[in-house]
């Protein structure tokens, strides 16, 4: 162990660790503890607070209306209060850590003085420590791109972003279930073809509200964006948990390289359990960006115990077209039964508009439902308006699906249930979202950089072996591919996340 001195009875000091406390890294920002660590009455009742038990008040809930939550003053008020609470607690913990470091430095300096081993360099370092200086860290694009280039790690300025993270996007499923009139009786139907057809209709409803103008029934997702905009990429450990009616939704960013967002949704009343691992990879295609979505979506019929797995289509963001720029869902996907029973699957083909990009060619889909030997049904139509059952020759037979209408003119109510406050998506990006809405790009850029720099530092610590590989809070995997919700989990913020990311965001 490297130390300032090695002698019998003297405390050994780790030079590397001490120097690391005073030397900023390449992308670190530093503040003067004497100016930033101000405390008063807000410290009352926080004496037992540590980086292992820090959290907002247990069972906190932030009510809101499903939709554009960033525009709702009620929810934003709750989030702002939570952010203030967490900042106060972070400052308290940092103050305690600083005071303990100063105490240790005083003891070590006294020991060195007693033994006559204090040098000018050591004395200067000691004075820096006790003075409080440097004791904590603050917490035309396309012309440079190549066709086929992965855009995952390309940094974009705040002006390119919309005020939500991709971890929140699957709230659309909650809206379809809780905000739309649906008949779920086919989930209990004795014919397996009717049961799988009901899952296909659910997926068509999910796709319909994400189209440019929403479904023809008048339901539109809050989580759509223009061709030159994108949602934030979640940071490692980011979480999102909400409840609306009888539907509970949990999500977590379980990996950042490559980015993997995992979510789980359950509604016992209708007998449905959905989950997904979403591995999005944006690729530059010259006149468009293709977001390749790897991973899978899983459906479980709680009435029958049947389980199904489905892959996901790509999202294309087209820069040019006769109707202007646009986004579209494109690709072949298969929903197949993986539980016991004869093979059963549904195939869907989401078609592109074509080279002209005309709106009249948008949102076309066709598909079939079949067993190993028999095709039970063919269907085609527009997944924002109407899909019909057809013959093999594409002749009309009967209506297959129509978009689910809204239950009410008002969107359903919901609550955000943050695990611990710190990792919650609404809170950790709260300042960024509000600055973006206010068009304060300087503040937005600063807030975004704090989170990203913290994430880089956390990855560096894991890469160098200083920290073990990341273990998600709510989800676990056995094969490295499929992530499933843990039966039980500790909602507390992980100390390593707090140290490298949380202290930066909530400094």
Image: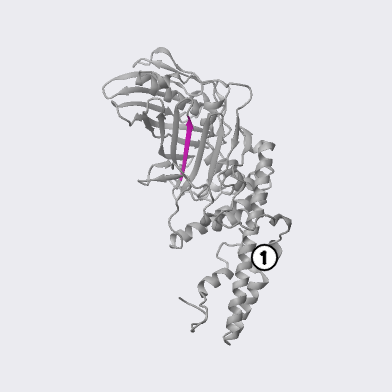
Q: Residues within 10 Å of mark 1 (few under 14, many from 20)?
A: some
Q: Secondary structure at mark 1?
A: helix
Please give the range of residues in magenta: 260-267
Q: Can you give x and y, in whole percent of width and height, for residue 428 in the image? A: 59, 48
Residue 362 appearing in the image: no
In the image as oriented, which residue stretches furthest toward the top? 397
483 part of magenta stretch: no
Q: Is residue 487 left or right of residue 174?
A: left
Q: Which residue lies at the image location 37% right of the left edge and 30% below the top edge?
A: 308
In the image as oriented, which residue stretches furthest toward the left? 373
Is the stretch drawn in magenta largely helix, strand or loop? strand
Q: Can you give x and y, in whole percent of width and height, for residue 9 in the image? A: 50, 82
Reading the image, the residue beneath label 1 is 33
Q: In the depicted view, which residue is nearer to us: 470 or 210?
A: 470
Report the quarter where the N terminus lies: bottom left
Q: Quadrant of residue 300?
A: top left
- Location of residue 130 with respect to 37 vertically, above or below: below
Q: Quadrant of residue 377?
A: top left
Q: Can you give x and y, in whole percent of width and height, for residue 411 in the image? A: 61, 27
């Amino acid at each position: 162990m490297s130390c300032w001195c090695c002698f019998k009875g003297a405390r050994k000091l780790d030079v590397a660790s001490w120097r690391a406390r005073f030397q900023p890294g390449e992308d670190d920002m530093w503040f003067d503890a004497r100016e930033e660590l101000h405390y008063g009455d807000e410290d009352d009742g926080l004496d037992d607070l540590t980086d292992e038990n820090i959290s907002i008040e247990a069972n906190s809930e932030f009510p809101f209306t499903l939709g554009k939550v960033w525009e709702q003053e009620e929810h934003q008020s709750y989030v702002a209060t939570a952010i203030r609470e967490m900042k106060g607690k972070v400052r308290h913990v940092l103050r305690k850590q600083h005071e303990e470091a100063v105490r240790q430095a005083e003891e070590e300096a006294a020991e060195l003085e007693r033994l006559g081993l204090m040098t000018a360099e050591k004395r200067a370092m000691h004075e820096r420590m006790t003075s409080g200086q440097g004791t904590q860290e603050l917490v035309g694009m396309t012309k440079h791109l190549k066709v086929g280039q992965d855009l995952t790690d390309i940094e974009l300025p705040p002006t390119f972003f919309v005020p939500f993270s991709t971890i929140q996007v699957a709230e659309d499923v909650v809206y379809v279930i809780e905000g739309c009139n649906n008949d779920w009786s086919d989930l209990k139907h004795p014919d397996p073809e009717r049961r799988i057809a009901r899952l296909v209709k659910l997926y068509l409803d999910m796709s319909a509200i994400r189209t440019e103008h929403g479904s023809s029934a008048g339901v539109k997702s809050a989580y759509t964006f223009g061709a030159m905009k994108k949602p934030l990429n979640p940071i490692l450990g980011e979480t999102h948990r909400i409840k609306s009616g009888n539907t509970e939704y949990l999500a977590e960013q379980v990996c950042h390289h490559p980015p993997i967002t995992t979510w789980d949704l359950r509604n016992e009343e209708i007998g449905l359990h959905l989950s997904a691992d979403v591995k999005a990879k944006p690729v530059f295609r010259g006149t468009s960006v293709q977001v390749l979505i790897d991973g899978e979506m899983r459906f479980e019929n709680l009435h029958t115990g049947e389980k199904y797995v489905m892959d996901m289509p790509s999202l294309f963001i087209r820069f040019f077209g006769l109707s202007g720029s646009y986004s579209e869902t494109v690709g072949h996907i298969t929903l197949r039964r993986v539980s016991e029973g004869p093979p059963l699957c549904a195939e869907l083909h989401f078609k592109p508009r074509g080279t002209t990009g005309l709106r009249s060619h948008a949102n076309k889909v066709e598909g079939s439902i079949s067993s190993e030997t028999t095709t039970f049904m063919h269907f085609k139509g527009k997944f924002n308006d109407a899909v019909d059952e057809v013959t093999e020759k594409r002749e009309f037979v009967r209506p297959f699906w129509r978009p689910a209408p809204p239950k009410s003119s008002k969107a359903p109510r919901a609550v955000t249930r943050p695990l611990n406050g710190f990792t919650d998506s609404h809170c950790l990006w709260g300042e960024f979202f509000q600055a973006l809405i206010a068009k304060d790009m300087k503040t937005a850029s600063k807030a975004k950089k704090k989170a990203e720099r913290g994430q880089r530092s956390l990855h560096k610590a894991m890469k160098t072996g200083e920290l073990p590989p990341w273990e998600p809070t709510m989800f676990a995997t056995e094969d490295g591919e499929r992530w499933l919700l843990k039966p039980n989990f500790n909602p507390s913020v992980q100390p390593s996340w707090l140290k490298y990311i949380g202290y930066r965001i909530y400094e």
